[in-house]
Image: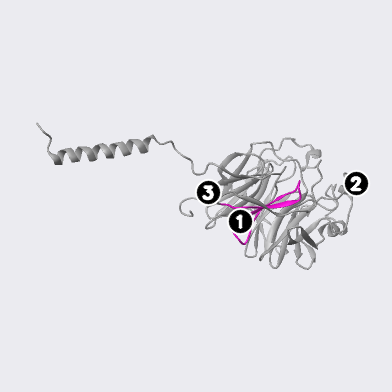
Amino acid sequence: MPIPRIVAAAAVAFLAMTTLVATSAAKPHVDARAPKLLATLSGEAASGSAIGPDGALYVPQPATGEIWRIDPRTGSQSVYASGLPRRFAPLPFGGVMDVAFFGSKAYALVSVVGTIFPDDLFACHPGTVGIYRLDGPTKFTVVADIGSFACANPPPPNFAIVVPTGVQYALEPYRGGFLVTDGHHNRVLYATLRGQISVASQFGDIVPTGLAVQGSTVYMAEAGPVPHLPQNGKVVSFRPWASPTVVIAAGAPLLVDVERGRGETLFALSQGTFPCGADPSCAGSPASHDTGSLVRVNASGGFTTIATKLDQPSSLEIIGNAAYIVTLGGEIWKISEIADPSFG
């Protein structure tokens, strides 16, 4: 007996629907927050980062004295500037540590450089450590001689100072000039575009690293003293020259950066577990491989983990609702949907 057409059509529709459901259910779960490799730079290492006026990522390579431009959508890369001072090969820090933009002009932060190792490490050479204005792909002007300032204005004598010029880490535009963290001298400096330098805030042994700015408020990451224990990894806020720091969150080892996300969210980058324990001779060494994490500040004064097993991350940028993470190995990773739906 033939099946009525309407019944046959219903049966076909039902089979199609169940097939679609089954196919959908069979798809593997994809974690939107799983890190995805965006680019690998052709150099030995990478350091800080910045978002340029064109929306691209700019990443320094201290080992080669270069700054690279990376398209955050495609990962395509090109050399933006070259010929800057290179880091000493035996050291895990120094060279071009960070980059920032003031309007359309790029500036580079250069730390711990010279020509002879280790003699230059303990010497004060004018015009080598500081903020460089990029006047062209291979042309630069030192606009703030931070090395000479540091030698003439050392931090309090209770610190064991090995490098008299300091170890500058991060560069952030602020009120017509720049804020600069010095993790060795435990302070934040302020430099104008005309080269005037002052101490904006002096701290105890907290090892300041990354910076973010909202109006007149500065957010800062603290790595904490060696051995960079989790309880000493903090995000704090303060106003330069005006107030002590206020702890926003604590509990992640060796924090190296902080950035604001959508809404009132704050994110921080933990480089991970310090491998040397309390050995002071290891100061400045990076964390163990694959122990880093991206965390978000939560309402309890702690951190909520967004991504783990990052390999020695060094810098963080946020575009929209995605995080872009630079690693010491020269990789740039993208993590999507980092904020909760209410902020996404």
Which residue is the site of mark 3? Answer: 338
The amino acid sitting under disc 2 is: Asp
The foreground one among 12 and 230 is: 12
Helix, strand or loop for disc 2? helix
Q: Residue at x 20, y 37 (%)?
A: 11
Sooner in the amino-acid sequence: mark 1 or mark 3: 1
Q: Which residues are magenta?
A: 49-72
Q: Disc 1 vs disc 2: which is toward the camera?
A: 1
Helix, strand or loop for disc 1? loop
Is residue 36 positioned above or below 213 on the image?
above
Is residue 281 positioned above or below 216 on the image?
above
Helix, strand or loop for disc 3? loop
* Scheme of colours in the image: one colour
Q: Residues within 10 Å of mark 1 (few under 14, many from 20)?
A: some
Is residue 107 positioned above or below 322 on the image?
below
Disc marking residue 229? none
Rendered image quadrant of residue 117: top right
> Residue 202: in sight, yes or no?
no
Sooner in the amino-acid sequence: mark 3 or mark 2: 2
Quadrant (top left/top right/bottom left/bottom right) for the N terminus: top left
Sooner in the amino-acid sequence: mark 1 or mark 2: 1
Which residue is the site of mark 2? Answer: 119
Which residue is the site of mark 1? Answer: 56
